[in-house]
Amino acid sequence: MRIKVITGLAILLAVLAVLLFERDFPAAEVDAKYSNAASQFLTLEDGSRVHYRDQGNAAGLPLVLIHGSNSSLHTWEPWVALLGARYRIITLDLPGHGLTGRTPTDDYSSTAYAATVQGLATHLGLPPFVLGGNSMGGGVTWRYALAHPDSVLGLVLVDASGLPAWRELDDAEAEQGDKASTPWAFSLLRKPWFQGLARYIDPYWLVEQGLKASHVDPALVDEALVARYYDLSMRAGTRDATLKRFSTFGQRSTKEPDLSQITQPTLILWGAQDAVIPSSVGTRFNEALSNAQLIVYPNIGHIPMEELPERSAADVDEFIQRQLNNLSGG
């Protein structure tokens, strides 16, 4: 009986895979659609071709911004428009994301991401800069600050991923949060049975649901936003990279990072209704960091720079002007 059930489930999954199958989109077509005059590409020593943009005031204090999981540098364009007159704003697509896509090493660890940021900073010859990140990119931000303290003047953590030891608490609290649903893709991609299908099925419905779960105001999740996230997720090689990344999810290093070593001024921004990483994680960051300021936005979800661009950008500007310009000579 058990064998029949397992066989039946296997057949059902195979049928679903056939019905929902979608081919990768050619990289050249996706690149043409989502690059612009500011887009540049840097080939690192490991062969990775990194998409980045260096925009705003070339003489201003550099602000380097790192996107979250399954996102891209496009998420920061509202801040570029609002802060670019004063700051030099550098954004990039991490390996496995955006127009950087799959890399020759297939390394999508936080260590590889920090090395990508370092490679770009070295290429651009950046002086000490302000480093910010959202979600997974926030985790890259504080890890980079620990590894390269002399390069970072200050940090901006936007609904950032926290210490590995916090993860189980994060997941439990997210399930009990104010928002009824969380992005299904994040939980499904951690399951081996789904990973076998995910390389082939059309993820449009997962992309749309994830964006709706990440935003409080459903009106912000329009066709253009869904299309951007979807098209970039379907760029040739990206699904393979995503599966590779999630296959190692939850693996910890033997040594827990020590956040108390981060002494730079840090601005923590959080959406009170974040369904991905609960706002209590922002409180933990505020308690763990010795020089931090926490701002929580009511009725905002996981991506404040897209949901509340004017207010969040103004808070970043005020923070830099008050805390950091004297350190940079600005």
Image (spheres, rainbow, N blue to C red):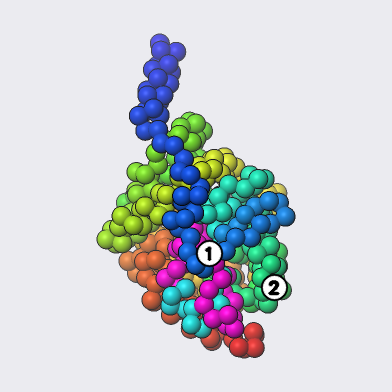
Residues shaded magenta: 53-79
> Where residue 111 sits: x, y (%)?
67, 54
Q: Earlier along the polypeptide chain: callout 1 or callout 2?
A: 1
| Residue at 40% from the left image edge and 33% from the top image edge | 21
Q: Closest to the observer: 130 or 77?
A: 77
> Where residue 92 sits: x, y (%)?
56, 62
Q: Identify the amino acid type marked 1.
A: Ser
Q: Which residue is mark 2?
A: 125
| Residue at 56% from the left image edge and 77% from the top image edge | 88
**Any part of residue 174 in sight:** no
Q: Which residue is mark 1?
A: 39
Element assignment for label 2: loop
Judge whether 112 appears above or below 24 on screen. below
> Where residue 234 sits: x, y (%)?
45, 45
Q: Is residue 57 magenta?
A: yes
**Any part of residue 100 in sight:** yes
Q: Circle 2: is it few (<14), some (14-19), or many (20+) Cα within 10 Å?
A: few
- Is the N terminus in the top left, top right, bottom left or bottom right quadrant? top left
Q: Is residue 291 magenta?
A: no
Distance Cα–Cα, label 1 vs label 2: 18 Å
